[in-house]
Image (tube, rainbow, N blue to C red):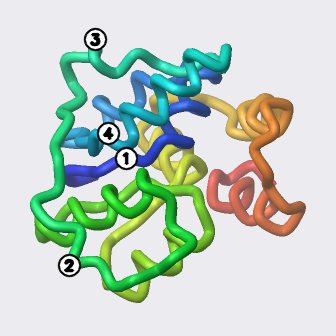
Amino acid sequence: MPEVVCNTSPLQYLHQLGLLHLLPALAQKVIIPPAVAEELAAGRKAGIEVPEVEGLEWIEICRPVSLAALPLVTDLGPGESQVLALALETPGTAVIVDDFLARRTAEALHIPLTGTLGVLLAAKRHGLVGEIASILDRLQALRFRVSPATRTAVLKLAGEV
């Protein structure tokens, strides 16, 4: 993976799975905007198990120069907006987002993207994880929504069907 700008949910879910170490193993550089750090801090205060990104030396917190570069999409949260803005400001950077609208916006803006499932598939291809099926089970137990069709597609790509 090239440099990536990561949103909140992939960090949360990978942390809860005990697989947060996959990000620095797969990406040349992992960047998050301040809004993502703030969302994680708010989650921690609410009792959600999320990483303390300030203590992770492989994460760089970077503020986008201008959110005006992002077309007005009213339903994007602050984290998604800043993630996409940073990617627009840094050509060649990919985003890691799970949110449907953020993914569609990234596609419309021609920003390379993946999500939590894509990170898991890349980790499998690089021999960093074994079976994906059991990880998907754990992910779904954490309330990560995966449709049956998506689950089958992921397992096919992982060579587990």
Q: Residues within 10 Å of mark 3 (few under 14, many from 20)?
A: few
Q: Position of residue 113 (x, y in %)?
A: 40, 66
Of labels 1 and 3, earlier in sequence is 1
In the picture, which quadrant includes the C terminus? bottom right
> In the image, what residue occupies the spot 28% across and 11% down?
55
Q: Nearer the viewer, mark 2 or mark 1?
A: 2
Q: Residues within 10 Å of mark 1 (few under 14, many from 20)?
A: many
Picture disc at residue 26: 4
Q: Position of residue 9 (x, y in %)?
A: 56, 42
Side (left or right) of 13 relative to 118? right
The secondary structure type at the circle numbered 3 is helix
> In the image, what residue occupies the spot 69% across and 58% down?
154
Q: Nearer the viewer, mark 1 or mark 4?
A: 1
Q: Position of residue 44 (x, y in %)?
A: 56, 17
What's the residue type where badge 1 is placed? Cys
Above or below residue 46? Residue 156 is: below
Question: Could you give the CA–CA distance between mark 1 and mark 4, rounded to whole angstroms?
Answer: 13 Å
Of labels 4 and 3, earlier in sequence is 4
Q: Which residue is mark 3?
A: 55
What's the residue type where badge 3 is placed? Gly
Picture disc at residue 69: 2
Question: Could you give the CA–CA distance between mark 1 and mark 3, rounded to whole angstroms?
Answer: 16 Å
Of labels 2 and 1, earlier in sequence is 1
Q: Which residue is mark 1?
A: 6
Q: Residues within 10 Å of mark 4 (few under 14, many from 20)?
A: some
